[in-house]
């Protein structure tokens, strides 16, 4: 806009110069000066108006960007996590929790100005709790699936996850075809349980459905199951820190990786969902998200 101002001003000056050169009287020169001043004033007025328009646009954009945070500011939301799902949720000696899910939602809450009341529970209870209104939002490294979308709304993906097949350290199972005639333990309501149900006939194995990850691991260790299906980042982390001694990852890519997301009851708590997405983008941009992941994966 300043370029336009200078262009208008220079045009006026050139016009004045040309008129003065062609005319010989003082009256013509005075008229030319008046014309030049008028052109300059018009250009300045236009520049000022454009600046005000720009300021108004910036203010509107800032207001829109903070609208999600404004809607949740000062509120407290009950957020469910899987009660035993390291590294996403890890119970401390004092009963509190840390982990990727916990640290992430707390960082987002701080970013957006709300607070969270962490509600640990079995993974299979999270969606029913959302539907009943017992909780406001759910984490638990929940895979985004079309089936779940019928009941809950999902955020933008905050992690990519895939399934691993886990066996005892001395097991001869090395590929999915080796599951013929075997028993596979899965956690109720998980992506692993869905995959097992879809593929049990293809690979000729029997499914043992259990309530939590601790139970599936114990089933394999005790010989009640030959293998288990678990989220790869979860089981690999647990094995790496010695939490699942005697187990190994036999197949690290059972299925294609998919996104996991934050969930709310379908059509409800949309202001919380908007704030989660806005906050997630912010902590990714400022580096907080990567620091959280590095503290558990690095």
Image (cartoon, rainbow, N blue to C red):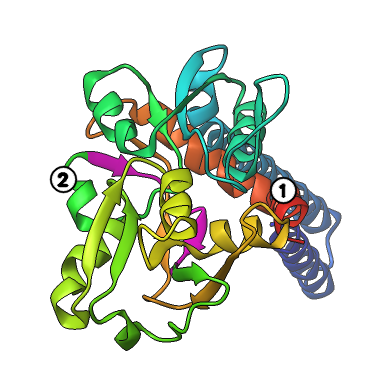
Q: Is residue 51 magenta?
A: no
Q: Is residue 159 magenta?
A: yes
Q: In which quarter of the image is residue 123?
A: top left
Q: Name the residue under label 1.
A: 292
Query: Height in image: 105 above or below 77?
Result: below
Which circle's residue, 1 or 2, is located before the other in the chain?
Answer: 2
Image quadrant occupied by the C terminus: bottom right
Residue 113 spot, x, y in % from top left = 62, 22
| Viewer can see residue 239 | yes
Q: Is residue 24 above or below residue 58?
A: below
120 relative to 211, above or below: above
In this picture, residue 99 sits left or right of residue 5: left
Residue extent of the magenta highlight: 152-163
Residue 43 at what x, y percent from top left? 69, 50
The residue at the point 60 percent across, 35 percent down is 102
Comparing 183 with 17, the one in front is 183
In the rendered structure, the answer to whether residue 83 lies left or right of residue 209 reads right
Residue at label 2? 150
* Residue 260 pos. (x, y %): 43, 54
- Position of residue 83 relative to residue 170, above or below, is above
Cα separation, mark 1 vs mark 2, equals 31 Å
């Amino acid at each position: 806009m300043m370029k336009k101002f200078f262009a208008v001003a220079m045009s006026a000056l050139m016009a004045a110069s040309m008129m003065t050169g062609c005319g010989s009287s003082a009256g013509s020169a005075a008229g030319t000066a008046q014309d030049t001043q008028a052109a300059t004033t018009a250009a300045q007025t236009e520049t000022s108006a454009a600046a005000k328009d720009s300021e108004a646009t910036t203010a509107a954009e800032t207001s829109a960007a903070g609208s999600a945070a404004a809607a949740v500011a000062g509120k407290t939301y009950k957020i469910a996590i899987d009660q035993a799902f390291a590294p996403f949720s890890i119970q401390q000696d004092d009963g509190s929790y840390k982990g990727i899910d916990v640290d992430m939602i707390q960082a987002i809450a701080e970013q957006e100005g709300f607070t969270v009341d962490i509600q640990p529970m079995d993974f299979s209870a999270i969606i029913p709790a959302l539907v009943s209104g017992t909780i406001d939002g759910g984490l638990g490294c929940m895979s985004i699936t079309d089936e779940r979308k019928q009941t809950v709304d999902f955020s933008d993906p905050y992690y990519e996850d895939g399934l691993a097949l886990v066996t005892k350290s001395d097991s001869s199972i090395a590929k999915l075809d080796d599951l013929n005639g075997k028993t596979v333990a899965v956690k109720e309501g998980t992506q692993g349980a869905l995959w097992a149900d879809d593929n049990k006939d293809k690979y000729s194995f029997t499914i043992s459905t259990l309530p939590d990850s601790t139970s599936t691991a114990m089933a394999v260790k005790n010989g009640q199951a030959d293998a288990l299906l678990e989220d790869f980042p979860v089981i690999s982390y647990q094995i790496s820190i010695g939490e699942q001694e005697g187990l190994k990852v036999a197949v690290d890519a059972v299925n294609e990786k998919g996104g996991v997301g934050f969930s709310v009851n379908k059509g409800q708590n949309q202001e919380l969902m908007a704030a989660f997405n806005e906050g997630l983008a912010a902590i990714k941009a400022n580096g907080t998200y990567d620091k959280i992941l590095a503290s558990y994966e690095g």
